Image: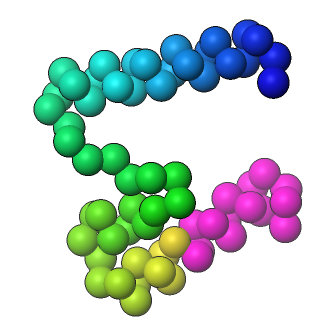
């Protein structure tokens, strides 16, 4: 990883942390979590939505 990329990523993470602290956010979905469960969808539907979104993202970035 290039140094500038690492610095930029660190800066982005810090901005997210600062924003969360300012708004009182206490929960974030881990990268391997299911945001649809966090949004209140039933587990079966959340799994289907996650699979569909993963497929769409993969197609957009050209890995499928």
Q: Nearer the viewer, residue 11 or 40?
A: 11
Q: Position of residue 2 (x, y in %)?
A: 81, 17
As rendered, which of 1 and 55 lies closer to the eye?
Answer: 1
Left-right relation of 63 to 43? right
Quadrant (top left/top right/bottom left/bottom right) for the N terminus? top right
- At a point 17% along the width and 28% down the height, the residue shown is 23
59 to the left or right of 32 = right
Total numbered badges shown on the rendered structure = 0
Task: Name the spot of residue 57 as percent of width and height, x first.
Answer: 67, 58
- The image quadrant that residue 9 belongs to is top right
Where does the image place residue 40, in percent across and percent down from the top left?
24, 71
Q: What is the basis of the colouring in this image?
A: rainbow
Q: Is residue 26 above or below residue 64?
A: above
Q: What range of the chain is rendered magenta?
A: 51-64
**The C terminus, quarter of image:** bottom right
| Main secondary structure type of the part rendered in magenta | helix
| Magenta segment includes 42 | no
Of 12 and 59, the residue lying toward us: 12
**Residue 62 highlighted magenta (yes or no):** yes
Provide residue 43's location: percent of width, then percent of height. 35, 84
* Left or right of residue 2: residue 36: left
Image point (48%, 25%), residue name: 13
Vertical arrangement, residue 5 with respect to residue 28, above or below: above
- Residue at horizontal 29%, vertical 23%? 19
Q: Residue furthest bottom?
A: 44
């Amino acid at each position: 990883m290039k140094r500038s990329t690492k610095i930029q990523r660190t800066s982005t993470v810090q901005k997210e942390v600062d924003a969360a602290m300012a708004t009182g956010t206490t929960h974030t979905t881990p990268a391997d979590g299911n945001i649809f469960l966090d949004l209140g969808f039933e587990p079966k539907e959340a799994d289907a939505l996650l699979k569909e979104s993963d497929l769409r993202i993969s197609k957009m970035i050209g890995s499928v």
